[in-house]
Image (spheres, grey):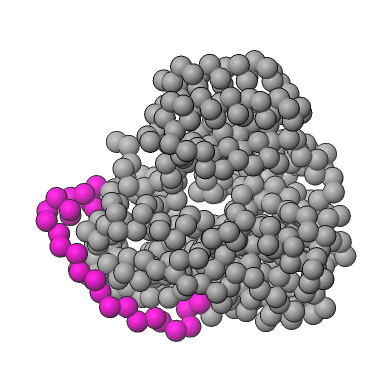
Amino acid sequence: MARQLFGTDGIRGVAGQYPLDRKTVYATGAALGKLASRLGPAPEVIVGIDTRESGPWIAGHVAGGLVQAGARPRFAGLITTPGIAYLTRMNSFVAGVVISASHNPYQDNGIKIFGHSGYKLPDEREADLESEIFALIQGGIEPVEAPLTEDQGLDERYLEFLCSTFPHRLEGLKIVVDCANGAATRLGPALFARLGARVETVDCAPDGRNINLNCGALHVDRLREAVPALGADLGVALDGDADRAILVSRTGNVVDGDGVLLIAARHLAAKGELPGSHGKPTVVATVMSNLGLERALGRHGIAMLRTAVGDKYVLEEMLRQGAVLGGEQSGHVIFHKYATTGDGLLTTLRVLEVMLETGTGLDELTEDLERFPQRLVNINVRAKRPFEEIPEVREAMRAAGQAFGESGRILVRFSGTELLARVMVEGTDPRMVDLHAERIAAAIEGAIGTARQSSATH
């Protein structure tokens, strides 16, 4: 049976509306508590939030459901998604819950759930949880909000862990941190300052409604201006829950997840620390990663495997292949030696480690990454109707595929977390890339679209 609540990154929607209405949120906590209670009496579940104004009441209703089912919620307060993943697996918590919609605007929120292993729940476990949630709702469950008192010190344990992974000091370096007015507002600046860097911040003043607002990993223009203007060595833009990072060099150049994968893969391979399938060093990326990354890695004898979009799918393939490095162009990068999910702060530390050990800046570390022209278009849609059932879209995709042959790629998909269609066209000729991206996007917009949300060229 198809899942109705869980997308590619937990449950997500507009706060206060289904599936983030109070009854469904409460039922989610109760269902999780019921499943957790099978593991023993009074199991503990850690809960954390980002800075959205809806976070406290959603956390309170999840906690109310947990209590109703006999579980004990522990509230970490404002903390990143990877922070909850780390604390869940390193402590006695049977599960971890993050109240966040990641890079989405403040009106949205979400519920992400980790098992005790620190991994996001597999699809089959989410399906079991959904069945229990619906059963509780049909049984007439009434939502109750539990009071939450922040457990001081949980976020400090995570900060100490991050510091422990870094074998150097950052004295003499200046770093600009854009926390997207989100979950890393305290932790991000504190981490780099504790390691000795001079830290400047932008967008670290959350008000409940400005999370991701023209800032953070999706909007790096302000950071690109700030880094060279302040004479900084590095800039990092996180998203709302800090599981992704986009970096900026001292000259203002942007280094996305593809660039990070190249930097880290080469460094690990040189040290003999990049295992893979069939004895060949391997990196796992997604269908969105630029063909230029695949070719750059190939020149260094490193294989690249592609998965569907979503860091959980990257991680699943990493586990199958025995790989230690994988990620997405969007900035989710998984260093499996240290973490079970993407972590923007950890990613930044790993890149700083390469910079210090090689004495090389970001510009030089990515100078051999020749990117193929790539056009990305997002279209708001009324419904997620299969593209092959829409003649105009099917024909536009067929024509693009025929025009490019082996010299390009076309990827058309629906977002796993929003009512969006995403079009990606990549090739050697930028004019053809733009032409076919526009034709496919226009066909989608005309058939099922409501508005063109965004368009970007890489």
Among the 4 quarters of the image, the one containing residue 15: bottom left
Among the 4 quarters of the image, the one containing residue 123: top left
Instruction: Check if residue 152 falls in the magenta segment.
Output: yes
Instruction: Check if residue 394 falls in the magenta segment.
Output: no
- On the image, the x and y values in percent for residue 284 come to 63, 44
Work out whether 215 lies above or below 196: above
- On the image, the x and y values in percent for residue 100 come to 43, 61
- On the image, the x and y values in percent for residue 28 come to 28, 58
Quarter in which the C terminus is drawn: top right
Residue nearest the viewer, comparing 64 with 415 = 415
Query: Which residue shows up at 82% across the image and 60% down it?
Result: 251
- On the image, the x and y values in percent for residue 256 come to 69, 51
Q: Main secondary structure of the magenta part?
A: loop
Give left or right: position of 372 versus 319: right
User: What are the residue bounds of the magenta stretch?
Assistant: 131-155
Quarter in which the N terminus is drawn: top left
Q: Is residue 295 visible?
A: yes
Work out whether 223 lies above or below 434: below
Residue furthest to the bottom in view is: 152
Query: Which residue shows up at 24% across the image and 53% down it?
Result: 133
Residue nearest the viewer, comparing 21 with 118 = 21
Work out whether 176 lies above or below 397: below
Residue nearest the viewer, comparing 69 with 233 = 233
Total labels drawn: 0
Work out whether 192 lies above or below 392: below
Query: Which residue shows up at 86% across the image and 55% down it?
Result: 364
Query: Which residue shows up at 64% across the image and 76% down it?
Result: 189
Give left or right: position of 368 versus 82: right
Q: Is residue 89 visible?
A: no
Among the 4 quarters of the image, the one containing residue 342: bottom right
